[in-house]
Image (tube, grey):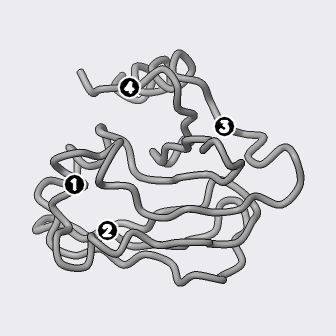
Amino acid sequence: MSSIPRELQYTRSHEWVRRLPDGRLEVGITDHAQSALGDLVFVEVPETGRSLRTGEECAVVESVKAASDVYSPVDGTVVAGNPDLAGRPELINQDPYGAGWLFRAQADGAAGGADLMNADGYEKYLAEQAH
C-alpha cells in the first residue's frame, strides 16, 4: 500500500499539497504516482512567476516507462521550483513527500484548491481505482 501522509491534501491526478507556515503551498506527486511511473529520469518544474490555473498542466515527470504531466492543484503563482530535481530526479522516488517536492505556489484567494481530498478521501479514491 502506498504511503499517504495524514497532514497533506490530494488530487485525483495524484498530486499532494502541503500548506506551509507562511501560507504558501508545496506541491509534489504522491507515492502512488511515483511508484506507478517507476524510476524517474527527468523532471521539468514550472518557472518561478508562472501563473497557474487549477487542473492546468504545469510540470512533467519522466521515467524509463513513460512521461506524465503534473497538474496544478490550485489557482496561483509559482514562487519556487525544486532546483535539486534537475540533477537528481530520483529524489521523487526516494522521498516523494519531502526532498522530492516539485514546486511552491502562492494560491490566489483564501480557498486555494476546493477539490482537494484529505488522506482518507484519497485512500478511498485509490481503492475505487483499483477495482
Amino acid residing under circle 4: Ile
Q: Kindly identify which numbered label has been placed on residue 61.
A: 2
Q: Nearer the viewer, mark 1 or mark 2?
A: 2
Residue 121 percent coordinates (x, y): 57, 20
Gap between marks 4 and 3 measured at Cα: 14 Å
- The secondary structure type at the circle numbered 4 is loop
Q: Residues within 10 Å of mark 3 (few under 14, many from 20)?
A: some
Q: CA distance from mark 1 to mark 2?
A: 9 Å
**Front: mark 4 or 1:** 4
Toward the viewer: 85 or 70? 85
Tag 3 secondary structure: loop
Of discs 1 and 3, which sits in the foreground? 3
Q: Is residue 35 above or below residue 125?
A: below
Q: Is residue 118 above or below residue 98?
A: above
Task: Quadrant for residue 89, please give it.
Answer: bottom left
Residue drawn at 55 percent across, 44 percent down? 17
| Tag 4 residue | 4
* Residue at the spot 66% in from the left edge and 83% down from the top edge: 49
What's under tag 3, amino acid-wise?
Answer: Leu
Image quadrant assignment for residue 98: top left
C-alpha span from label 2 to label 3: 21 Å
Lower position in the chain sequence, tag 1 or tag 3 = 1
Which residue position is annotated with label 1?
A: 37
Q: Amino acid at mark 1?
A: Leu
Report which residue position mark 3 lands on: 116
> Which corner quadrant holds the C terminus?
top left
Give the Cα separation between the discs numbered 4 and 1.
17 Å
| Among the two numbered marks 4 and 1 on one chain, the one whose residue lies closer to the N terminus | 4
